[in-house]
Image (spheres, grey):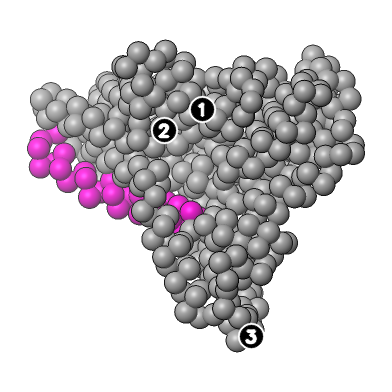
Amino acid sequence: MKNFSKRIIRGIVLSVAVVMVCPLFAFAEEAAEEPALYATAWSIVPPVAAILLALITKEVYSSLFIGIVIGGVLYAGSFEGTLTHVINDGIVASLSDSYNVGILVFLVILGVVVALLNKSGGSKAFGVWASQHIKTRMGAQFATIVLGLLIFVDDYFNCLTVGSVMSPLAEAHKIPRTKLAYLIDSTAAPICIIAPISSWAAAVTGFVEGENGFALFIKAIPFNFYALLTILMMFLIVGMKFDYGKMREYANRIQEPAENGEKEDIAVSGASDAPKRRRTGKVMDLVIPIIILIISCVIGMIYTGGFFSGTGFVEAFSGCDASVGLSLGSIVALIVIFVFYIASGVLGFRESMDCIPEGFKAMVAPILILTLAWTLKGMTDSLGIAEFVAAGTESVAGSFMSLLPAIIFAIGCFLAFASGTSWGTFGILIPIVVEVFQGSDPQLMIISISACMAGAVCGDHCSPISDTTIMSSAGAGCNHVAHVATQLPYALTVAAVSFVTYIVAGFTKSAWISLPVGVILLAVVLVTIKNMQKPVEDGAVEA
């Protein structure tokens, strides 16, 4: 009966979406070079529709596709124009973009590396070793957080590397995939956005014109409340040994038999259908390839930044092309790993080659979701969502100057949530902030730039169409919609605290005052939530 009701709800939602779209096909005129709905509130309809459908139906592929179609209809207004716009300007454009292709190459190679680690027995050996040295679920979660904080050069690299390394440990301690995905996602972007040597620092500094972008980035770190409080929240949640919202349900049901197709949502990390391993393996069979991968990717990134042509290390990171660097580094690493395994007798040549299609198949789902998410972003860009948000931001800039950091944070959250991109949000909001405050209030400009970055990361965390969120799900082997549903209450909690903290910062203009206020407020909120929860039933596993 429950499944039947779900089907009815999904059918109704999809029917409503189709009914909404049909009139546009019938009555809209051919689109001009700039559509009539350009830079209006209609530009946010496609992503909002996709997100709501994904959360209601728990099916991400059709939801993203419907959002894409709605965007095409709003842009073109005719069947032929919509089809051409969706295919040529959407899917084909996203898959022919050099940056996107580089990320897909990196994804596939990471999948192959993970398949190699599994087949060599290195992942299993690490899981056994870690379970002997890390005795508790709390210790396993703390280890995941620390590793995520150490890999700060790039969020994509963080998501997939931490997922592949920590999955055996999470499996040994029965940590739900949803919890592992949350820990991965909450260390990826938040640590990258406060690390001066990272691809994110390069992106932010590139959007600051007329100012020393790198110096502003450094000064903005203490005011990046969402990133700092998210990291703090992970330690508090794990240390206080509790979860809430949907995450608590999954943690408490982890030892119960899966029903109604929910196995993928609540299963512990680690794929039960992993390829058969040739032997038990050694811990070094995992550690050495991961070190090779990290070193190769770092070298690849600084290479694209001109390090070997005389550019300084920090400047090379600031000017690197993360997509090209990660692709180059991962390809070199894969070749070296092949040689290492074959030369040491861990794997034979044929076994190693068999991991190539296995790794590719493992990444098909995230690649498909990423492609659809990029296409949806293309639809919203063509409808002028950036211009719509920019106009709204500038209209409130004249008043409420002390409240502007909090307002910018909220706008950044909304824009990143709707578009699924942090970097696009930086590109829209940071130039506006610099123009508003340049030469008038440098300190408030720093706080507001930090609010841009914090809001972008927050919206990125909450959005089902965010590439970082998608990769976190892939790294943890977690159902994507389940990851979004379980992470959302945590992200909203930190967002609410951060919003209040930015109000304090706007008036005090001091991180020494506002940041402690945010820390205390977050701790009080979490203690209150924990005390309001009912005790866990006997036999359930508390996270």
- Which of the two discs, 2 and 3, labels the residue nearer the N terminus? 3
Residues drawn in magenta: 347-374
> Which residue is at the front of the view, 177 or 407?
407
Q: How dense is the environment of label 3, judged by Cα within 10 Å: few (below 14), some, or many (20 and up)?
A: few
Instruction: Give the residue at mark 1.
Output: 202
Spatial CA span between label 1 and label 2: 9 Å
Residue 290, how many percent across, how many down? 32, 26
What kind of element bears circle 2? helix
- Give the amino acid at mark 2: Ala
Spatial CA span between label 2 and label 3: 44 Å
Q: State yes or no: residue 349 in magenta.
A: yes
Quadrant placement of the N terminus: bottom right
Q: Which residue: 14% across, 33% down?
A: 347
Q: Main secondary structure of the magenta part?
A: helix
Instruction: Give the residue at mark 2.
Output: 322
Picture quadrant where residue 145 is located: top right
Q: Which residue: 35% across, 27% down?
A: 304
Q: Which residue: 23% across, 30% down?
A: 332
Residue 149, how many percent across, how many down? 52, 23
Q: Which mark is nearer the camera, 2 or 3? A: 3
Instruction: Give the residue at mark 3.
Output: 27
Residue 74, how many percent across, how many down? 61, 71
Spatial CA span between label 1 and label 3: 46 Å
- Give the amino acid at mark 3: Phe
- Which of the two discs, 1 and 2, labels the residue nearer the N terminus? 1
What number of labels is visible? 3
